[in-house]
């Protein structure tokens, strides 16, 4: 277990969230999502993770084991089905999301006591969130 991401994390910056969402959802939903203050709640026991993304509008939870592929359905977000796999790359937790959207992934890491999240997307869109 290279790093602990455990905790309750409040968002402090959100760069190009709109661009990321443009690749995924319609303008109406984007407008709502843009105004949300996101909170991450991460529980980690060895290789087992639960990551909750919380907001006043919707919540989204995933549970997985590092190194074990799982089926992901982004219910209430862009409602797509993927096969996801999370691995440690050094101190970074990297999730590849194989599905309709190419090169979809997210990366979490801790830096200066903050939780970083970089969500990448193939159409040149990179969203960076700090909690
Ligand atoms: C769950 C709170 C956001 C609700 C916004 C509602 C609709 C927007 C639909 C799609 C926009 C795409 C992403 C929303 C942003 C964050 C949600 C989860 C991001 C993510 O991949 O988190 C990972 C890594 O922490 C764990 O699921």
Image: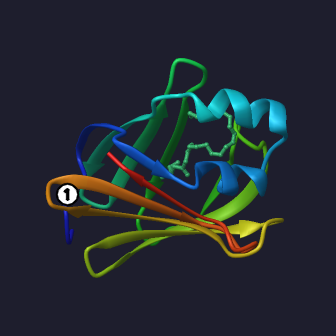
Question: Assess mark 1: CB under 8 A from ligand 1?
Answer: no
Q: Position of residue 110 (x, y in %)?
A: 23, 61
Q: Determine whether, in the image, residue 125 is placed left or right of residue 25.
A: left
Q: In terms of image quadrants, where is residue 4? A: bottom left
Q: Determine whether, in the image, residue 119 is placed left or right of residue 73.
A: left
Q: Which residue is mark 1?
A: 4
Q: Is residue 81 visible?
A: yes
Above or below, comparing residue 122 to residue 49 in the picture: below
Above or below, comparing residue 25 to residue 5 in the picture: above
**Camera-nearest residue between 13 and 41:** 13
**Camera-nearest residue between 70 and 10:** 10
Q: Residue at x 66, y 48 (%)?
A: 18
Q: Residue at x 42, y 44 (%)?
A: 51
Q: Position of residue 104 (x, y in %)?
A: 66, 68
Q: Quadrant of the N terminus?
A: bottom left
Q: In terms of image quadrants, where is residue 108? A: bottom left
Find the residue positioned furthest to the left: 113
Q: Residue at x 28, y 53 (%)?
A: 115
Tell me the element at label 1. Answer: loop
Judged from the image, the quadrant occupied by ligand 1 is top right
Above or below, comparing residue 55 to residue 42 in the picture: above
């Amino acid at each position: 277990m290279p790093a602990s991401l455990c905790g309750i994390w409040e968002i402090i910056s959100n760069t190009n969230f709109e661009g990321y969402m443009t690749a995924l959802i319609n303008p109406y939903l984007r407008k709502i999502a843009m105004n949300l203050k996101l909170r991450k709640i991460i529980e980690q026991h060895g290789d087992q993770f639960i990551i909750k993304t919380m907001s006043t509008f919707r919540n989204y939870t995933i549970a997985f084991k590092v190194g074990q592929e799982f089926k992901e359905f982004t219910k209430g977000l862009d409602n797509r089905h993927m096969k996801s796999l999370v691995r440690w790359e050094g101190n970074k937790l990297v999730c590849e999301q194989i599905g309709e959207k190419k090169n979809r992934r997210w990366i979490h890491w801790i830096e200066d006591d903050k939780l970083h999240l970089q969500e990448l997307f193939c159409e040149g869109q990179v969203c960076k969130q700090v909690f």
